Image: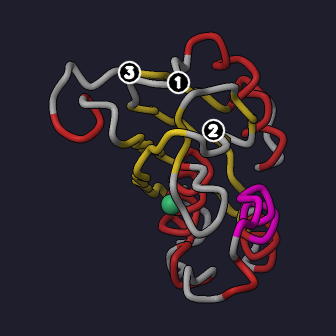
Amino acid sequence: MNELPRIGVGIDLHRLEPGRPCVVGGVAIDSPVGPVGHSDGDVVLHAACDAVLGAAGLDDLGTLFSDRDPANAGRASSEFCTEVVRRLAGLGLRVVSLDVVIETERPKIAPHRASIRSRVAELFDLPTDRVNVRGKTGEGVDAVGEGRAIRATAVALLVSV
Ligand code: MG
């Protein structure tokens, strides 16, 4: 039944701390806080990769790129996307649609939404209109609402090529 589309979901969360570089969806954002992570802590790309890997039936991002491997320290998450797309192609699959919701108090996503959208599309080899990115706040509730964390949720649709 390879011809049927496959759907996958990915969720990622990173703590936010002052003075950290802030990369969201492959876009460097000027922000007083940034994600703490072994790599660059890019929640959008981590969630998107996990959604794609989940749909493909592959191991998750943390298994493929362990945070205990020094080779992944400070690594740009865009490299993870390239590797995920490469593995998909090896299985005869490709991404046809990605939808991402980012929850954070800071940085504000709206001013960067268009650039994040086009960068994510580029990284997953998709036309921009096949990717959507939206920002939400956390209504003051839980770690996200209190500004201590940023979370992204992604859904990916794959088809056989
Ligand atoms: Mg992560």
Cα gap from disc 3 to disc 2, whole angstroms: 14 Å
Q: Secondary structure at mark 3?
A: strand
Instruction: Report the span colored magenta.
Output: 74-83
Along the viewing direction, whichever of 37 and 111 lies nearer the viewer: 37
Query: 88 or 1, which is in the foreground?
Result: 88
Query: Does residue 76 sit above or below 29 in this rendering?
Result: below
Horizontal and vertical percent for residue 39? 65, 65
The disc, 2 or 1, on the residue closer to the chain's N-terminal end is 2
Q: Is residue 41 left or right of residue 105?
A: right
Picture residue at 60% right of the left edge, 50% below the top: 42
The answer to whether the residue labelled 3 contacts the one labelled 1, judged by CB atoms less than 8 Å apart, is no
Residue 96 image-quadrant placement? top right
Residue 83 picture quarter: bottom right
Q: Dot 2: what SS?
A: strand
The amino acid beneath tag 3 is Lys
Q: 154 or 65: nearer the eye? A: 65
In which quadrant will I find the C terminus?
Answer: bottom right
Q: Are marks 2 and 1 in contact (CB under 8 Å)?
A: yes
Which residue sits furthest left? 141
* Badge number at residue 136: 3
Calculate the distance from the C-alpha at mark 3 to the C-alpha at mark 1: 11 Å
> Does the magenta segment cover residue 157?
no
Instruction: Point out the tag, 3 or 2, that comes first from the N-terminus.
Output: 2
Please name the residue that numbered disc 1 is placed on.
107
